[in-house]
Image: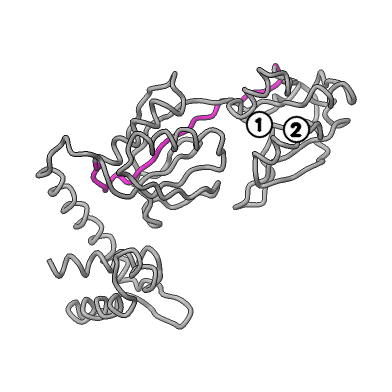
Amino acid sequence: MDRLGNIAVFIQVAETRSFTEAGRLTGVSSSAVGKSIARLEARLGVRLFHRTTRSITLTSEGALFLQRCRKILADVEAAEFELCDAAAQPQGKLRISVPQVLGLVMPVMTEFMTLYPQIELDLDLTDRMVDVVEEGFDAVIRTGKPRDSRLMARSLGEFRMVLVASPAYLQQRGTPQRPAELADHACLRHIFHATGKLEPWPLRREEGADEPKLPTRLVSTSIEAVSHAALAGMGIACLPDFMSRDAESQGLLHRVLDAHLQHVGQFWVLWPSSRHATAKLRVFIDHLALRLFPVNEGRIEL
């Protein structure tokens, strides 16, 4: 059991790259973490980490050992789960990464918290492509088709990107009838934080026409900021339909060039395939599938 404790500490240090943070997560001091790692290295006869005053990184031996240790703890967790009462109340901490579309995900998250008060949610709000396994997430919600063979996946539903503008803006500047006419409009653009690249608008290219020019009035890493600017009459924005739907129904935003768009995206929940699906993770995944896009209940596992 002492060895398992050392292994658990080692995994926390490897994932956080910090003795202090690993100590906080395991409930011990940073010096105790350091002693645990030292005992482990002495028993194995290898150095697991490169240490400097500024950073902690895995050695090649440490990286190999980390893969084995994760499997060991996953097997222990699975064995414990099999011996537990399957009807036990789901509880514990879930570390989840979700995209920065608060209007879509937060009502679902708060509803989940009400249904399962014994589960603590640790939410990482980011649009960057996190490494689910290396960064220690229990699950992530992302768009696009999953390609990581280390992950299990379940489809949560589809969405479309649409072009919208306020009635006041369209009355002042006119409604574009063809993509080329966007050159005479103010475009509100979303930019990917991780790459610094503008998110392309899914406009169907007209035969013989050049790619339409999109004069930019606003660039933001927050899609919600782009939506706010559109509602304020600042220009035309490209938004996911779930974000513009309420404003459209209230007449606050109108769609433009809908017949000239070609886009269907999907939301997925992903989780490590090596990790046993605990009760807390199972109920979380089922809740997302039921509530995020209620009409979709498809499931695909990689």
The N terminus sits in image quarter: bottom left
User: In the rendering, at what x and y percent does residue 204 appear?
Assistant: 70, 24
Which residue bears the numbered disc 1? 239
The residue nearer to you, when weighing 201 against 186, is 186
Looking at the image, residue 159 lies above or below residue 199: above
Q: Is residue 88 left or right of residue 24?
A: left
The residue nearer to you, when weighing 48 against 225, is 225
Please give the count of numbered marks on the rendered protein. 2
- Residues in magenta? 259-278
Residue drawn at (23%, 45%), measured in percent from left and top? 276
The C terminus sits in image quarter: top left
Q: Is residue 51 left or right of residue 127?
A: left
Q: Nearer the viewer, mark 1 or mark 2?
A: 2
Residue 181 located within the stretch drawn in magenta: no
**Amino acid beneath label 2:** Ala
Q: Secondary structure at mark 1?
A: strand
User: In the rendering, at what x and y percent does residue 169 appear?
Assistant: 84, 27
The residue nearer to you, when weighing 179 against 166, is 166
Callout 1 crowding tier (Cα within 10 Å): few <14, some 14–19, many ≥20: many
Looking at the image, residue 153 lies above or below residue 162: below
Q: Do tag 1 and tag 2 residues touch (Cβ < 8 Å)? A: yes
Q: Earlier in the sequence, mark 1 or mark 2?
A: 2
Which residue bears the numbered disc 2? 230
**Amino acid beneath label 1:** Leu
Residue 284, located in which quarter of the rendered image? top left
Residue drawn at (62%, 51%), measured in percent from left and top? 193
Q: Give the number of the disc on residue 226.
A: none
